[in-house]
Structures are given as C-alpha cells and as structure tokens.
Image (cartoon, helix red, strand yellow):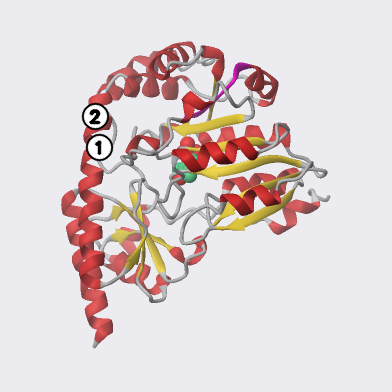
Amino acid sequence: MDVKKQLLNLTPYQPGKPMDEVKRELGLERIVKLASNENPYGCSPKVQKAILEQLTNAATYPDGYARMLRETLASQLGVKEKQLIFGNGSDEVIQIISRALLSHDKNTVMPTPSFPQYKHNAVIEGAEIREVPLKNGYHQLDEMLRQIDEKTAIVWLCSPNNPTGTYINNELLISFLNQVPAHTLVVIDEAYKEYVTAVDYPESINLLKDYPNLLITRTFSKAYGLASFRIGYGIAQENLLQRIEPVREPFNTNSMAQAAATAGLTDQAFINECKNKNKEGLKQYYNFCEEMNLAYYKSEGNFILIDFQTDADELFQFLLKKGYIVRSGMALGFPTCLRITVGTFEQNNEIISYLREYKMKQAI
Ligand SMILES: *Cc1c(COP(=O)(O)O)cnc(C)c1O
C-alpha cells in the first residue's frame, strides 16, 4: 500500500511532552508553558458560562453555519455574514484554502521562516513551493512579487510574523496588493492581530472591497485564550468564499467552540486588558535585551524572538529544568534564538532572571 509520494517527506507533528510527565521526570512542583503563544491570562470569564450551557446539546450536531458566532462576528467586524468562513482553528482555514486552490500544476509563494502550515499543506497538495527568506526578520515583498508567475495560486503573508513578531505596514501592504496579479490569492495570516499596537498596521478588512483576491485569517486561539476549542476564521469577499466553501466539512467547528468564541467576542474589555499587559511584558524583555546586549526583533505579537548567540536547544533544556518551557529556535530556522511567549509580569521576571544567570555563567 502506497501513500501519496509527497507524504514521504513529511513527518507527523511532534507534540511536546505532556506537562505532567515533564513535571514528574524533573521533580518540578510547577511548570510554566511559554512555548505556544497561548494567553497567560486564560480566557474571558464569560466563556465558562457559555460552554456550560452547551453541555446539554452534546447529542446534537453543531450548527454548520455557526449562526450565532457568525452574526456576532460579522457585526463586530462590519462585514457581511457571507464574508466569513470558520475553521477548526485557523489551521483548518489554511488547509481549506490550500485544498481549494493548490495542485501539482500550481505553485505557492511564502516567507521563511514563518508559520509552518503554509508549506505543510502545499506539500500535501503537491504544489511547487517557493520560499522567500525574511530579511532582517521582515518579509521581502519585492522578492515575493518576483516569484509570482502565471501558475502562482497563493501567496502567504504572516503579519505579525511567527516566529519573528515583525509586521507589514499599511503602505507596504497596499503597494504589494497593487502588484499581485488577479489570479493569485493573497492570504494574510493575522493570528496575533488583537495584540498589535503599531499605528501603521493595516486595517486589512477595509482593503477587502478593493481586492477580490485578498483573504485574511484570524483565530480565537491566541488573545481570546481559546486554543483548546480549535476555532478560527477567514474573511474575504463573499464571491471568493462561496467558491472555497465546498471544501469545508459541514460540521467542522463544534458547538462548544462556537459558544466559547461568541462569548469571548462580547468581552472586548478582557482583550484590551491582555493587549495592554502584553505590551508591558514585551518591555520587560526589551529592557533585558538592551541591558544584556542581545539582538531581538520588536514584536507586535505576544511572543519575542531573542538571539542568545548560544545553542538554543541547550538553553531550552536549562530553562526546562527551572520549570519553564519555551520554544527553541532550532526547529524554527533560528538556531541560536529562543521564541518566548510573553507571560505574566512575574513569569517574565522569573524567566529573565534565569536567562541572566545563564548568560552570566557563559561569560565566565
Ligand atoms: C497559532 C497560529 C495559527 C494557528 O492558530 P489556530 O489555533 O489553528 O487557530 C495560525 N497562524 C499563526 C501565525 C499562528 O501563530
């Protein structure tokens, strides 16, 4: 029995060890996970009530149209209901788009290093992959444009970019969109949009009316603190989404997730508070980096990539023994860097003191 030959080059996603197992192995009392850019403050307290109410509906299929969530989100974003597509995480939205547009006779252009799912899905669909390296952490939009030809089905942008935290400003984005041919879909992954404070970050939804080939993805996994429920969405012109929709499984998002996301949307005070605390947390890291003379990227997300000029896996292990799980840059294309999710004030302080200890020891 043969699987598709393009699958031979792929490895299954390697999940991190369960936290309880790590705790036992290392004899730790508590572990703080700052590895996957989850919200350190959890989610809005309004969410719990909403999902408890859903418990009685377990035997019923979810609403495949996600009506409540759709209405709430459409009115909040100022778009039409049919301008939204929901997925089991924005991961699934990326998969749906890839399945709808990519095939062996198409190519797709993407930045690297960036979010791995663009490439992963393109490999599965058998499309040619054209990766354009970041320059100083930023998308090389000019080079990405040069890579687009008549067979380019999708060009991916990630802003803020995971793992660098850098963003594409309004002027650069518009100039880029003006040069992308109509047959190429531009996807902007805005998974961290709720955290952005840069004043020249594009209000990309306002661009949708002018660019029928633009699709924005967002998620409830990060600022909304709902990663375990798996729910995200895409926004585009209605006509584009109607052509993509047949790929979506009819019941791809579940009732709990829909209810949780709807409740989360009604609590923008919570999102604002998280955004402000995140900004303060980033400052803690910036100050530390300046003090220690470490290179880093200014981040518009809830994470920071810092170059420790050391073997990232070793530093990862050092922090793990102290009870902190972060992301080694080794697998992210930055072998001497760590990507650290911004935690609470206390968590940031503590991890920074361990990092200082490590660098001091190294200096001896
Ligand atoms: C986390 C993340 C996603 C995926 O989020 P879901 O949990 O699948 O909604 C998508 N894009 C980027 C850049 C991310 O960091």
Q: Is residue 351 visible?
A: yes
| Image location of residue 101, percent across then percent down | 72, 34
Question: What stretch of residues is rendered in magenta?
Answer: 230-238
At x 58% / y 52%, what residue is drawn? 111
The amino acid type of the residue labelled 1 equals Cys
| SS at mark 2 in the image | helix
Q: Mark 2 sits on what residue?
A: 270
At x 62% / y 19%, what residue is drawn? 250
Q: Residues within 10 Å of mark 1 (few under 14, many from 20)?
A: many
At x 39% / y 24%, what residue is drawn? 261
Q: Quadrant of the C terminus?
A: bottom left
Q: Nearer the viewer, residue 272 or 328?
A: 272
When the figure is inspected, residue 337 is found, relative to residue 311, above or below; the finding is: above
Q: Mark 1 sits on what residue?
A: 274
Q: Nearer the viewer, residue 2 or 142?
A: 142
The amino acid type of the residue labelled 2 equals Phe
Q: Is residue 234 magenta?
A: yes
Would you say 85 lies left or right of 263 here? right
Number of disc labels: 2
Q: CA distance from mark 1 to mark 2?
A: 6 Å
| SS at mark 1 in the image | helix
Q: Mark 1 touching mark 2, by CB under 8 A?
A: yes
When the figure is inspected, residue 101 is found, relative to residue 363, above or below; the finding is: above
Q: Which numbered disc covers residue 133?
A: none
Would you say 100 lies left or right of 316 here? right
Q: Nearer the viewer, residue 109 or 33?
A: 109
| Image location of residue 252, percent across then percent down | 57, 25
| Image location of residue 7, percent across then percent down | 73, 52
- Label 2 lies in ligand 1 vicinity (Cβ under 8 Å): no
| Image location of residue 219, percent across then percent down | 45, 33
Q: Is residue 65 magenta?
A: no
